[in-house]
Amino acid sequence: MDKLVIEGGVPLKGEVRISGSKNAALPILLASILVEGEVRLTNVPDLRDIATTLKLLELLGCRAEFNDGDVLLHSCDLKPEAPYDLVRTMRASVLCLGPLLARLGRARVAMPGGCAIGARPVDLHLKGLEQMGAVFELESGDIIGTCDRLKGAHIHLDFPTVGGTEHLIMAAVLAEGETVLENAAREPEIQDLAEFLNTCGARITGHGTSVVRIEGVESLHGCSYPVMPDRIEAGTYLVAAGMTKGDLTLRDCPVDALDAVISKLREMGMVIEGDRNLLTATVDGPLNCVDLSTRPYPGFPTDMQAQIMALMCVSRGAGVITEGIFENRFMHVQELARLGAHITLSGQSAMVRGVDTLKGATVMASDLRASACLVLAGLAATGRTDVRRIYHLDRGYEQMEVKLGAVGARIRREKE
């Protein structure tokens, strides 16, 4: 395994280009199963999860080529089975179930794995697909689904689940008649998925609102489509500027999708300016802790909770972070404590009291965003910090140590 070695205490200065969004690219890649013809995607990040998804697509009978951010796909000889060995490593793999049912009328997909940050059941996915006419059974850990042509349905989601909303949109585009999703998730990545599908000939309206309408079509055609920039990566580098009292410019940044993050960082005292696709982030004085709760979009994103906690660890005063999405997303707290952070947990809330200085230590990542949090803490800590188990980090951040090194960080990758 690899680890990152960080010698902290250096203000970061310079420009970082934001990569394409992992959370947008994964469902778009899996939605290519629906398309008859060639799909060309640009701005696709070079990540472990992307490589896993391309392997899965190849096993499902798609031709897939990746070259420097460009992906060519053609679902020419589809097969209905997604094996456990791939699906267990990445939760988003389950999103192939609906597209396979829509194209083939049958699918066998292993129950998903992924980061250990909560139960994240697929019940809402299956319930919605059943309303569209699918029938499911569970056998040896696999979800087996069958259907005739899926039929449009009026589906009310119990919770605005991102994966469930994406899954049902994909299944509905080839269904007979109209599907209405109520209490749908509104995340920008869902909007990107819908725009991709519309470019292929789908008829989706209302994406980005809580009510999405999909009028089924007979088939989808190929297209060329650019994946949106990664708002969580951008937010992470904004926090990096704050952690190190630095001065960073983010290029190709999804500014409009970062309102909640930018608002909290400004409340803490950071100076963030820019528009369109360019942001600058600086610190001209002490930062202060704040209170926040993670919520579905447009609320503060759960995927930024760990990173802003790291920033609060080196800010003045105290603040309470309440996790409103996942029930097990504070595993980074004990690792931050190894660096000298003062954090008290109570149920789904964490009280953070800022300290003057974090001190380097060996820490272990438990999930993707926890990995980023610990790297950020290491950038601010005195002395050496070793971040172990960074295979989590490689799932969601493209060449993080290279990007950080280019703006002044003393960071290197080593074998453990």
Image (spheres, grey):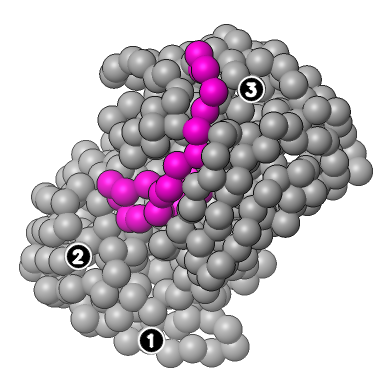
Q: For the image shown, how many numbered marks are present on the structure?
A: 3
Which label sits on residue 273? none
**Would residue 289 be visible to someone looking at this image?**
yes
Residue at left 41%, top 49%?
292
Residue at left 33%, top 15%?
274
Residue hosting label 2: 183
Residue hosting label 3: 244
Majority SS type along the magenta span: loop
Q: CA distance from mark 3 to mark 2?
A: 40 Å
Q: Which mark lies nearer to you, 1 or 3?
A: 3
Q: Is 51 on the left-hand or right-hand side of 382?
A: left
Q: Which mark lies nearer to you, 1 or 2?
A: 2
Q: Is 184 on the left-hand or right-hand side of 280?
A: left
Residue hosting label 1: 136
Snapshot quadrant of residue 3: top right
Q: Nearer the viewer, residue 386 or 100?
A: 386
Look at the picture and state if 163 lies above or below 411. below
